[in-house]
C-alpha cells in the first residue's frame, strides 16, 4: 500500500528566484543546462534572476561567465576577502598538500586560530566550537541553549533566515509556509524604524515580552532569542545602534539566552567593529558565524560563554568530523589575516559610507525610494509604491535587481516581498567599484521607477 499523499501547501518562495515558466525564453545553451540540472539535481534547488547567470571564474569583486563577460559582484558576502584571494588559495593549497584531519588529534593551527578569533570578541566569550556551515552552527547553538536552560522556546523576527537543518528551518520563517514553524517558536516584527514610528528598542522589548507570555501560555519556557544582527532577510535594519539592549534585558529576565547570528554581519562587514553585536554595545551569550569565515571553504563556528558548556561538555560532548578540519582552519586563518593586514573593517566603513551617500543622492528624485539604510558594506534600499504610505513594492524591487543584472552588476533583494534591494559585496569592494554600481543603479532607477 502506498504512503498517503501529503496535503497541498503553498509552494516555497524565494526572493529573486528564477521562474521556471520563463525557461523557453532563455538562450538555448541556458535551457539545455537548466534541463540537465533539473534531471540530475532534482527540483529542490533555485536559481537567481529572470535570466540565470552561468559563472565560470572569479577574481576579487568580479565574476565572469562562459563567454568571458564580466560582472561586478555586489552581493556575495561568502567570498568576503574577494573571489580567488591569493593568500587564501596559498594557505589552503599548502595545507591540503600537508595534512587534512579532524579535531580528535592535537593540532596547533586550530588553537592559534581560535585564540585570534576569540581576541576579536568580549572576554566573556571564551569557547569556540567548529562546524562546517552556519546552519550547523545555529543547530549546535540551540542544542546547547536548550540543554543549559532546560527549555525549548525560541523567538525570531518575522522573516528571519537562520539555516536549513530540520531544527533550524523550524525557526526560519523566510523559508515560507511549506516549512512550518515549530510549536515552540514565536515571531516578532523586524526593527523597521521607518514604519514603527516609535522607540525601536522598547517596541521590540514589548514584543519579546508578549512572545514569552504566549510561549508560557502554551507550555513552553524561553530558551533563546535568535537574531541576525543586520536583519538581512527582514529587509536590512542596522540603526539606531543600541536598539537591541532592551531585547537582551527582556530575554535574560525571562531566563533565556541571546544568540547573535553573525553569519551575515560578522567579520567586519558593518564597518564599525568585527561583529554586528558590538555596534549595539551588548555581549550575547552565544555567537554563530559561517559563510564568509573561510572565503568559500566550508567552515563555521559557535562561540559561547563558558558556563553554557560545562554540563553539556561533561554529559553530551561534541564531535564533527569535518568541523574544524585542517584545511578549513587554514582558510579561516588566511581570511582573518587578510582582514587585519588590509584593514578591511575600516575599509568597509569608508567605502560603505561612500556608497550609501551616493545611493541617497541618486534616490532623492524618486518617490518610490523610501529609505537607504545599513552599515558598512551591507546596504538596503527600501522600494515602495509611494512615500506617503510606504507600502513595500516587491515587484519594483525585483525589476531593479534584474535590470542591474542586465547591466552586469549583481545585487539581490530581501524582505517578505523583495522590496528591499540588498547590496552586500565582498569586503574588498573599492570606490571605483562603488562608482560602477552607482552608475548602473541610476540607469536602473530611470528605467524601472516612476
Image (spheres, rainbow, N blue to C red):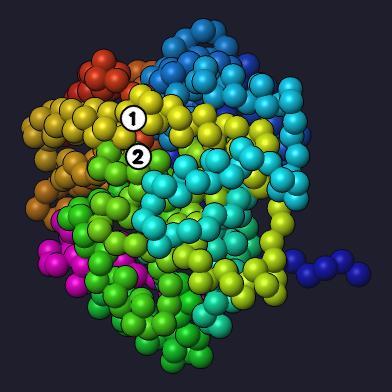
Q: Which residue is drawn at 43% across and 72% down?
A: 257
Q: Nearer the viewer, residue 215 or 410?
A: 215
Residue 289 among those drawn in magenta? no
Q: Residue 344 carries which label?
A: 1
Q: Check disc 2: other Cα within 10 Å, few if <14, some if 14-19, many if 20+.
A: many
User: Which type of secondary structure does the marked residue at label 2 adopt?
Assistant: loop
Q: Is residue 381 left or right of residue 295?
A: left
Span colored in magenta? 179-202
| x then y, percent, for residue 47 | 54, 35
| x then y, percent, for residue 110 | 61, 42
Q: Which of 31 and 417 is in front in this view?
A: 417
Whole-angstrom CA distance, mark 1 to mark 2, is 7 Å
Q: Which mark is residue 268?
A: 2
Q: Which residue is drawn at 83% across and 68% down?
A: 3
Q: Nearer the viewer, residue 292 or 36?
A: 292
Q: In this view, does 382 lie to the left or right of 322?
A: left
Of all residues shown, which one is farthest toward the top? 68
Q: Residue 248 carries which label?
A: none
Q: How many marks?
A: 2
| x then y, percent, for residue 350 | 21, 30
Residue 272: image quadrant is top left
Q: Is mark 1 in CB contact (under 8 Å) with mark 2?
A: yes
Q: Which residue is drawn at 58% across and 21% down?
A: 89
User: Which type of secondary structure does the marked residue at label 1 adopt?
Assistant: helix
Q: Check disc 1: other Cα within 10 Å, few if <14, some if 14-19, many if 20+.
A: many
Q: Which of 57 and 80 is in front in this view?
A: 80
Amino acid at each position: 500500500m502506498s504512503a498517503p499523499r501529503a496535503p497541498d501547501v503553498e509552494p516555497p518562495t524565494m526572493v529573486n528566484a528564477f521562474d521556471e515558466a520563463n525557461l523557453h525564453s532563455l538562450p538555448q545553451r541556458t535551457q539545455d543546462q537548466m534541463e540537465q540540472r533539473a534531471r540530475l539535481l532534482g527540483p529542490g534547488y533555485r536559481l537567481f534572476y529572470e535570466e540565470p547567470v552561468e559563472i565560470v571564474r572569479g577574481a576579487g569583486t568580479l565574476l565572469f561567465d562562459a563567454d568571458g563577460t564580466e560582472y561586478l559582484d555586489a552581493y556575495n558576502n561568502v567570498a568576503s576577502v574577494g573571489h580567488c584571494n591569493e593568500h587564501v588559495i596559498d594557505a589552503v593549497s599548502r595545507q591540503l598538500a600537508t595534512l587534512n584531519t579532524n579535531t580528535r588529534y592535537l593540532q596547533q593551527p586550530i588553537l592559534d586560530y581560535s585564540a585570534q578569533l576569540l581576541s576579536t570578541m568580549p572576554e566573556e566569550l571564551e569557547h569556540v566550537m567548529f562546524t562546517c556551515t552556519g546552519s550547523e552552527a545555529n543547530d549546535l547553538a540551540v542544542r546547547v541553549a536548550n540543554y543549559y536552560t532546560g527549555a525549548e522556546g525560541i523567538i525570531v523576527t518575522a522573516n528571519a533566515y537562520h539555516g536549513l537543518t530540520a531544527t533550524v528551518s523550524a525557526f526560519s520563517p523566510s523559508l515560507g509556509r511549506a516549512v512550518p514553524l515549530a510549536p515552540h517558536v514565536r515571531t516578532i516584527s523586524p526593527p523597521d524604524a521607518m514604519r514603527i514610528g516609535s522607540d525601536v528598542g522598547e517596541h521590540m522589548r514589548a514584543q519579546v515580552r508578549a512572545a514569552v507570555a504566549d510561549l508560557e501560555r502554551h507550555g513552553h519556557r524561553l530558551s533563546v532569542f535568535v537574531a541576525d544582527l543586520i536583519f538581512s532577510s527582514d529587509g536590512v535594519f542596522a540603526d539606531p545602534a543600541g536598539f537591541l539592549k532592551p531585547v537582551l534585558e527582556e530575554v535574560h529576565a525571562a531566563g533565556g539566552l541571546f544568540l547573535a547570528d553573525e553569519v551575515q554581519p560578522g567579520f567586519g562587514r558593518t564597518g564599525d567593529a568585527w561583529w554586528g553585536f558590538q555596534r549595539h554595545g551588548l555581549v550575547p551569550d552565544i555567537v554563530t558565524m559561517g559563510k564568509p569565515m573561510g572565503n568559500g571553504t566550508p567552515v563555521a563556528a559557535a562561540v559561547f560563554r563558558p558556563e553554557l558548556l560545562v554540563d553539556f561538555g561533561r554529559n553530551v560532548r561534541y564531535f564533527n568530523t569535518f568541523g574544524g578540519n585542517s584545511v578549513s582552519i587554514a582558510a579561516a586563518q588566511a581570511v582573518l589575516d587578510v582582514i587585519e593586514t588590509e584593514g578591511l573593517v575600516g575599509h568597509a566603513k569608508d567605502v560603505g559610507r561612500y556608497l550609501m551617500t551616493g545611493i541617497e543622492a541618486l534616490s532623492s528624485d524618486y518617490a518610490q525610494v523610501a529609505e537607504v539604510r545599513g552599515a558598512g558594506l551591507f546596504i538596503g534600499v527600501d522600494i515602495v509604491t509611494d512615500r506617503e504610505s510606504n507600502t513595500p513594492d516587491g515587484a519594483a524591487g525585483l525589476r531593479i535587481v534584474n535590470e542591474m543584472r542586465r547591466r552586469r552588476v549583481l545585487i539581490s533583494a530581501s524582505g517578505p516581498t523583495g522590496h528591499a534591494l540588498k547590496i552586500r559585496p565582498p569586503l574588498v569592494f573599492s570606490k571605483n567599484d562603488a562608482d560602477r554600481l552607482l552608475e548602473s543603479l541610476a540607469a536602473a532607477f530611470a528605467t524601472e521607477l516612476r
